[in-house]
Amino acid sequence: MRDYIFPEELLEYIRSIPVFTDYQEEQLHQQLAQLVKWNNLIARQDMTNAKTIEEYKKKRFRYQCTPYTVEIERMLVQLEKIGDTFQGSLEHSQFDRLLQALTSLQTEKIF
């Protein structure tokens, strides 16, 4: 994981995936803005390559994952490792009520 990534790098990577060859830069900027709004990404203005006032005003951003996002990713990796070994079970009485409700719906011919 790198500290910061630029939108151009993301766009190049996304377009390298066959399904997303026609992915537009505007879509990327909208989706990055939404991820910033949801606090999944941190946007920082990149002023290192600005040579003119116009380039500085354009507000070119670079992005970084928030710690929240990193923890979600770690949790997903752990869940994938568990695989099918973790299985939940329904409480018997709730299962009976669900079955009864489905049976009554079927007899009423709602389906």
Image (spheres, rainbow, N blue to C red):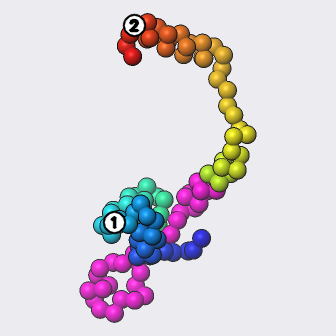
Q: Quadrant of the N terminus?
A: bottom right
Name the residue tied to disc 1.
Answer: 22
Name the residue tied to disc 2.
Answer: 108
**Between 59 and 101, the one nearer to me in the picture:** 101
Whole-Å distance between the Cαs marked 1 and 2?
48 Å
Residue 44 seen in this snapshot: no
Q: Residue at x 69, y 34 (%)?
A: 87
**Between 19 and 82, the one nearer to me in the picture:** 19
Residue 13: say if magenta. no
Residue that extends furthest to the front in the rendered view of this protein: 18
Local packing at callout 2 (Cα closer than 10 Å; few below 14, some 14-19, many 20+) is few
Q: Residue at x 40, y 76 (%)?
A: 8
Q: Position of residue 101 (x, y in %)?
A: 49, 12
Q: Residue at x 33, y 78 (%)?
A: 59
- Which quadrant of the view contains residue 77? bottom right
- Which quadrant of the view contains residue 73? bottom right
Tell me: residue 60, above or below residue 107: below
Residue 61: numbered disc: none
